[in-house]
Amino acid sequence: MSRAPAHRAAPATGSRHLVLLFAGLMLSMLLAALNQTVLSTALPTIVGELNGVNEMLWVITAYILASTIMMPVYGKLGDLMGRKPLLLGAILVFMAGSVVGALAGTIEVLIAARAIQGLGGGGLIILSQAAIADVVPARERGKYMGVMGGVFAVASVAGPLLGGWFTEGPGWRWVFWINIPLGLLALAGAVLFLKLPRHRGRPRLDVGGMVLLATATTCLVLFATWGGGRYAWSDPVILGLIAGTLVTAAAFVAVERRTAEPIIPMHLFRERNFVLTTVAGLLTGVAMFGALGYLPTYLQMVFGVDATASGLLMVPMMGTLLVTSVLAGRAVSRTGHYKWLPVAGSVVVAVAMGLLSTLTPEQGVWHVCLYIALLGLGLGLSMQVLVLIVQNTFPLRQVGTATAANNFFRQIGATLGAGVVGSVFAGRLAGLLAERLPAAALEGGAGGADSLTPALVASLPESLRDPIVTSYNDALTPIYLWIVPLGLLAAALLCFVTEKPLATTIEEDVEPEAPAEDRLEVTGDAPADPRSGNEPADLRTGDAGRDTRDRGTGERGTAAPHGDPAAREPAASAR
């Protein structure tokens, strides 16, 4: 018997199984979300103690880069072989990176630990988001995605608070050690609670695509991070990285068009909603991580607050993000309308960035709290809704791949945001400090300007402290103004999204009576069907004349022949 899709109505959202499954996914997402924020308040002290202020941006960028590269891999493999085993492996790798980070004695080892964490962290969010689509239909998924957005809101405050508390208490290394008990809890939740559909077969990895994707992404990040700072834009290193990015990206597209199981299928880009939300997500990633990555450092250096207080000052953003994310999700589930939410959210993000660019040391801290609260409101309106739009565009068997591809480009934006903003910030800061401080002012420090910590700056005489404070302010705040057009561009693009009805039923694959591994195992040498873009015809439509149903209406019908376009576009109308 061939594999045929079956459909069923949404499970009862109050069922014990769904509640426990959702709890397990929340634990995994919390682990990843905390890791993105817990270092923010501890970072100035960490890089100061390890004499690595000039490498500060790589502590953040290494994690984002590694997780970005792995996202499409986790997404595709999750669709092919099931999400639960991959989620367990991702948690274990993440915990291994945390141990290395806790034991790091140099900035180089710390950066390597962050990269290892990223290799696991790339799967935590993707697999959790895709697993929800396995059991909850799109129309009801909004409220669950809203709560998942709330996890990031809580982590945006809990992370900095924990980071500050550890830094001032038992030491910054506990920023990494805390991931061990949390990881064990997430492992237990995944083992006990996650009862997801199983997949049979031995899928082949798209090794060529993965290598080319990793190479292109790395070249892009290095050129964006080093250009204009460590190397001039005309330096052969930067020109070589630009050429490497273009060549490997072109080769990646060529490979993905030919392989049978690409990690980022090119046919995804035929869907207008996918393209628009993906570009908007990339721009949002630049804005979000460009703004938040260095804001706690700014608060500590410019306003003189300690690490814990800088974490507490992120509470306004958490509150608005949490409330708007949950309310937006419920509104989508109740009304079925969603287009206006990310449009409005992107505009609000742009306004918040413009306000952040006006900050000065003379203003009260309440200005920062107000502006980041506005930023949280904008992010809460848009982030999870963009994922929902993507998932509603494709059939269930492609949800993991499509979600991962969308998040991949959002993370590309995050990587560019953290890398470019960090590079420009560090370059401007070094120039301003050299210009405004006496040449021998910091010679007494072990690492000079690279060893500046909030505590050291606070202990300096006013004649030295004021130039440092103003240098930090003048190096960072103008960058926020440059981000404003990105938010406005995202809003303009999202105006062209087609608001398709949200599906009210779930498409799920029925296990065959006897494994047919020749149909499930697709090698890299298998030719792709030119009519589908990537998917072989037998995987796309199954045997001719099989029984199918519309995902939204549940109506039965006979699968059209391969030449009929209707056979290649699953319906998604709401019942």
Image (cartoon, grey):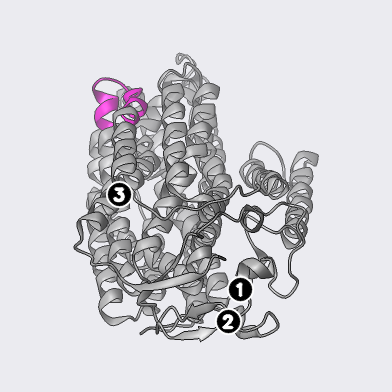
Q: CA distance from mark 2 to mark 1?
A: 7 Å
Identify which residue, 310 or 64, lies in the foreground. Answer: 64
Q: Amino acid at mark 3?
A: Met
In percent of width and height, residue 231 lies at 70, 38
Residue that mark 1 sits on: 541
Is 288 inside the magenta-drawn segment?
no
From the viewer's perspective, is residue 530 above or below residue 219? Answer: below
Q: Amino acid at mark 2?
A: Ala
Name the N-terminal-most of marks 2 and 3: 3
Q: Residue at x 52, y 61 (%)?
A: 406
In percent of width and height, residue 182 lies at 30, 34
Residue that mark 3 sits on: 26
Q: Residue at x 43, y 32 (%)?
A: 92
Name the N-terminal-most of marks 1 and 3: 3
Q: Secondary structure at mark 3?
A: helix
Would you say 370 lies left or right of 542 here? left
Q: Are marks 2 and 1 in contact (CB under 8 Å)?
A: yes
Would you say 293 lies left or right of 493 here? left
Residue that mark 2 sits on: 559
Q: CA distance from mark 2 to mark 3?
A: 38 Å
- The total number of labels drawn is 3
Q: Residue at x 42, y 55 (%)?
A: 197
Q: Quadrant of residue 327?
A: bottom left
Q: Residues within 10 Å of mark 3 (few under 14, many from 20)?
A: many
Is 178 inside the magenta-drawn segment?
yes
Q: Where are the magenta residues, as a range?
A: 164-179
